[in-house]
Amino acid sequence: MNQIEAEIKNEVISKNLDSDQIEYFQDLEKQFQEKLVKLYCKDVNQAKTFYYQEKLKIDLSSNNGQNEFNHLFEKYLEGLQWVLYYYYK
């Protein structure tokens, strides 16, 4: 866990966010989104790798990361299937 993630975790746990802290975290998210869009314009696969690495800490370049991604994807599809079954049956 890097310093920024630790700061976010500590602040979320304490729930004592002031306006400066909220602005700080919003700026971090804006920087992330700008970088993601730039990567996406160059190479979609690079953007995908960047997103999963930053948000979910899944390294898609490793076998373990690929296994984690596949498990996540399976659970996502399972959730979609459940929702569709619930609303249509």
Image (tube, helix red, strand yellow):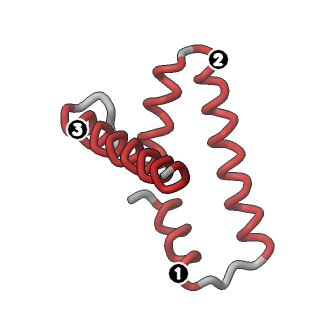
Name the mark on residue 13. 1
The answer to which of 70 and 52 lies nearer the viewer is 70
**Residue 8 point in image, percent of width and height:** 55, 67
Q: Amino acid at mark 3?
A: Asn
| Amino acid on which disc 2 is placed | Cys
Q: Are marks 1 and 2 in contact (CB under 8 Å)?
A: no
Q: Position of residue 88 (x, y in %)?
A: 53, 49
Mark-to-mark CA distance, 1 and 2: 36 Å
Residue annotated with mark 2: 41
Most foreground residue, 66 or 76: 76
Q: Position of residue 83 (x, y in %)?
A: 49, 52
Query: What residue sits right under mark 3 in the picture?
Result: 67
Taking the image as shown, residue 38 lies to the left or right of residue 80, namely right
Looking at the image, which residue is at 69% across and 35% down?
34
Q: Position of residue 22 (x, y in %)?
A: 73, 68
Circles 3 and 2: CB atoms closer than 8 Å: no
The three-letter code of the residue at mark 1 reads Ile
- Residue at x 32% of width, y 39% of height: 69
For mark 3, give the secondary structure. Answer: helix
Circle 3 or circle 2, nearest the eye: 3
- Measure how far apart labels 3 and 1 are at the Cα level: 30 Å
Compute the Cα span from label 3 to label 2: 27 Å
Q: Earlier in the sequence, mark 3 or mark 1?
A: 1
Say what secondary structure mark 1 lies in. helix
